Amino acid sequence: MFKVSQNGTDRLDIEMSGKLNAVEMKIALDELVSKSQNIENGKMLYEIIDFHLPSLRAIGIELSRLPSMLSFMKKFDRAAVLTDKLWLKRVSEFEEAIFPWLKIKAFRREEKLEAETWLMR
């Protein structure tokens, strides 16, 4: 499952659980681009509930859309990641080196209030 919700004019809330296949990946990426259309200096709250690597075809879909995904990422300046997996926390914070304009901080899932407070700074 991949769910994208608008939360105000400058924030997207994203929930992910399970394993995405190619069809689900296409729908998810389309939804991210569509719902971020008018966002500038945005915030993302990304909750990873039960992570499984996407299928190889899903990864192929994501790689084929790399230019549009970079444009999508440039609309945001902060991202909070909620996860209970230590390795996902480390990977998400490592992404800050890949996207230097984007501040990324990982939190435990029960720290949602702290994550939302950090996003609003």
Image: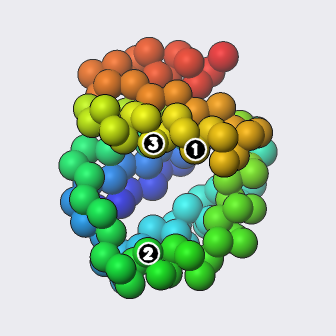
Q: Which residue is mark 2?
A: 59
Report how far apart the C-alphas of labels 3 and 1 lie in the structure. Answer: 6 Å
Residue contact between numbered discs 3 and 2, judged by CB atoms under 8 Å: no
- Kind of residue at badge 3: Val
The image quadrant of residue 90 is top left
Q: Residues within 10 Å of mark 1 (few under 14, many from 20)?
A: some
- Residue at 45%, 68% (x, y): give it: 28
31 or 109, which is in the foreground? Answer: 109
Residue contact between numbered discs 3 and 1, judged by CB atoms under 8 Å: yes
Q: Horizontal and vertical percent for residue 43?
A: 62, 37
Please give the label number shown on residue 91: 3
Residue 45 visible here: no
- Kind of residue at badge 2: Ile
Please give the label number shown on residue 95: 1
Describe the element under mark 1 as helix, strand or loop. Answer: helix
Q: Horizontal and vertical percent for residue 71?
A: 74, 62
Report how far apart the C-alphas of labels 3 and 2 lie in the structure. Answer: 17 Å
